[in-house]
Amino acid sequence: MEYNCKEFKVGKCEGEKLVDGETLPLVLTPPEPSKNGIESLLVALKNNKQWFEEMLVKNSAVLFRGFDVKNAVDFNDIVETCDWEDIRYVGPAPRTHIHKRIWTANEGPLSEFIYYHHEMVLIKEFPKAVILFCEVPPPEGGETPFVPSFKVTERMMEEFPEFVEEVEAKGLKYTFTALSNDNTTSMRGRGWQDAFATQDQEEAERRARALGMDVEWLENGGVKTILGPRALTKVFEGRKGRRMWFNTMVGMHGKELSSAMMADGTEIPENIVKRCEEIIEDESIQFKWEKGDVLFLDNYATLHGRRPSLAPRRVLVATCK
Ligand SMILES: [Fe+2]
């Protein structure tokens, strides 16, 4: 598809990569310096809605840079201009509601690396788009790297074709343990009461099952949730038949509070998990946040994470169907 929009100019960012002929992320900037206001951006977006959606699917990530996006109100206006339905976040990250469709991305300690994931990968209904806005860029670290997911599958197929096909056939099973009390010293430490938004065990169980999880209550008051079988890869409509690495094997395998195995109970070899981790890192795209940046990610096509950061850092998020 040719680039044919006069209301945006294509820019460049440090760290961008050419992946199968497309630049990730596609950087869109004001067509001229005077048109950098939020109003100009909203009008340009509104006039080119269909085109923009196509660009996001084609490039998997679009970064608006150089526009004067100041705060959650501006950011929400951008999100609403796209006209995509909101999807409510379910998961372990502690988030605070800021304004309308806007939340903080993660209140977990900045010193932690939030491992690469497709947003809500284990939940039946996951967002199509994850949109992030940088209100306060970190002084050091704190990048939001992202990874073209099909590249991970491609490279795993090159190195471990039999493993990939075995897991594909059997599916994956995950466990995740939630403690009973809130403990935001770890981003995985959110208590089950928060995770399921109830104080009541039976209600928590109902909600867990509605999300496709089994639960086992523990003596210490915590709960172990079991999910599976889940797919290793997924193919989504309109994305060139690419097999996305739509799982969280590396993120959950062999951790203190989580595990990943094949659905029949077969262990996943440590060396394969390690190698997969290296491949994901190797394929990742790193860019430095600038104040006012708005990053759109196709959540079907990209994994994203957060690098450890020095304070202050404020990145807000919206998720859409
Ligand atoms: Fe995320």
Image (cartoon, grey):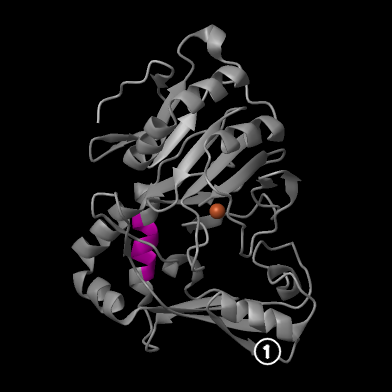
Quadrant where the image shows the N terminus: top left
Indicate whether 216 appears above or below 77: below
Mark 1 Cβ and ligand 1 under 8 Å apart: no
Neighbour tally class for label 1: few under 14, some 14-19, many 20 plus, Cα within 10 Å: some
- Secondary structure character of the magenta stretch overall: helix
Mark 1: secondary structure: strand
Q: Quarter of the image holding residue 198?
A: bottom right
- Pick whichever, 106 or 52, lies toward us: 52
State left or right for residue 250 relative to residue 130. Answer: left
What residue is rendered at 40% in x and 37% in y? 53
Q: In this figure, which residue is indicated by the disc labeled 1?
A: 217
What residue is rendered at 52% in x and 9% in y? 33
Report x, y in % for residue 319.
56, 49
Numbered-mark total: 1
| Magenta residues (range) | 273-279
Q: Is residue 45 magenta?
A: no
Q: Is residue 307 visible?
A: no
What residue is rendered at 23% in x and 35% in y? 21
- Pick whichever, 44 or 273, lies toward us: 44
State left or right for residue 318 relative to residue 173. Answer: right
What residue is rendered at 59% in x and 37% in y? 80
Give, as a three-letter code, the residue at label 1: Trp
Indicate whether 310 appears above or below 183: above
Report x, y in % for residue 151.
29, 52
Q: Is residue 106 visible?
A: yes
Indicate whether 280 appears above or below 61: below
State left or right for residue 56 relative to residue 294. Answer: left
Report x, y in % for residue 142.
59, 42
Report x, y in % for residue 206.
65, 82
